[in-house]
Amino acid sequence: MTYKRVLLKLSGEQLAGQYETGIDPDFAHWIAKEIKKVADAGTQVVIMVGGGNLVRGANVAGNGIRRVTADHMGMLATMINALALTDIMESEGVKTRCLSNIFAEQVAEPFVHRLANKHLEKGRVVVAAGGIGRPYMTTDTAAVALALELDCEAVLKATKVDGVYDKDPNKHDDAVKFDNLGFEQAVADADIKIMDKAAIGLAMEQGMKVVVFNPMEDDAIAKVVEGNDIGTTIS
Ligand code: UDP
C-alpha cells in the first residue's frame, strides 16, 4: 500500500534544526531531498509549516500586543518559513508552489481549493503558508483541516522523537513506544502529547489518520508513505 496523497506537518522547531531560532539550511535541504524521493515516486505531498522557530502567538501576546495581533505575527512567521522552504525545495529540483491562507498576493499564490488540487494533480508539492488563516489556531489544527479539505490519506506529523510514548522518553528510561494508538487513548491520556486538543479532536471526529514519526532517519518519509510500520499510527 502506498499513499497517493499525504500532508506533512513540519514544525518551526524542526526547521530551526541545530539552531534555537531561524531556519537551518542543512535541515531544509535534507528534508527537501527526502520529500523529493516520495514526490518523484508519485505521491502527492502537501506541507503545512509551523512558525514556532520565529513567533508563537501565545508567547508574544501581552505587553500591549493583543492575542489576535500575536497570532497574525505567528501566521506571518509561517509565511517566512514557507517561502524559504519553497525556494529550497525548488533548488533541489522539486516542483513546488507556495499557497497562502493570508492575503499576500505579492509573495505567494492565494490558497484556493481548486488551485491546490490542480497543482497536486500535476505533481507539484504544495506548501501552505499562514496556517488556516485565522487566530487562536495552531498549524497542527490547520494541518488536520487542510488534510481533510484536500482528501489526504494521512497527516504525517514530523517530530524529534520516533513516535508516541506512554510518557516523555527524554525524562523516563522506561517509556514505552506505541506502534498503534487509538484516538480515544490519545485524547484521554494526559501523559500522551501528540498535537493540541483541537487538532487531535478534529482528526478523531473525522477519522483522519495521523502518523507521528522522526523524519531525520534516511527514507523515513518514504517508509511512512509506503505504509511501513515506523513511528506511531493514530487511528
Ligand atoms: N497561527 C494562527 N493560525 C493558524 C496557524 C498558526 O494564528 O491557523 C499562529 C499561532 O500564533 C501559532 C503561530 O502561528 O502559535 C505559529 O504556528 P505554530 O505554533 O503552530 O507553529 P509550530 O509549533 O508548528 O512551529
Image: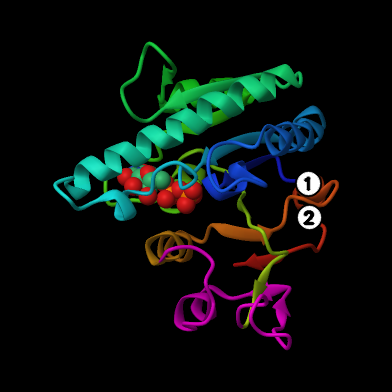
Residue 168 or 134: which is nearer the viewer? 168
Q: Secondary structure at mark 2?
A: loop
**Residue 208: percent from left, percent from top:** 53, 57
Q: Can residue 218 be seen here? A: yes
Q: Secondary structure at mark 1?
A: loop
Horizontal placement of 68 versus 139: left or right? left
Q: Can residue 7 be seen here? A: no
Number of labels in the image equals 2
Neighbor class of circle 1 (other Cα within 10 Å; few <14, some 14-19, many 20+) is some
Q: For the point 51% across and 61% down, which residue is it? A: 207
* Amino acid type, residue under disc 2 in the picture: Gly
Horizontal placement of 172 versus 136: left or right? right
Q: Mostly what secondary structure, the magenta segment? A: loop
Q: Dividing the image into 4 quarters, which one contains the C terminus? A: bottom right
Q: For the point 46% across and 47% down, which residue is it? A: 52
Marks 1 & 2, CB-CB < 8 Å contact: yes
Q: Quadrant of residue 68?
A: top left
Q: For the point 58% across and 76% down, which residue is it? A: 182
Marked residue nearer the N-terminal end (1 or 2): 1
- 3D distance between C-alphas at marks 1 and 2: 6 Å
Q: Which of the numbered marks, if any, corresponds to residue 227?
A: 2
Q: Which residue is mark 1?
A: 2
**Residue 60: percent from left, percent from top:** 29, 49
Horizontal placement of 30 versus 89: left or right? right
**Residue 127: percent from left, percent from top:** 55, 30
* Amino acid type, residue under disc 1 in the picture: Thr
Q: For the point 78% across and 36% down, which residue is it? A: 38
Determine if the magenta segment contains residue 168.
Answer: yes
User: Where are the magenta residues, as a range?
Assistant: 167-196
Q: Quadrant of residue 111?
A: top left
Q: Residue furthest left?
A: 64
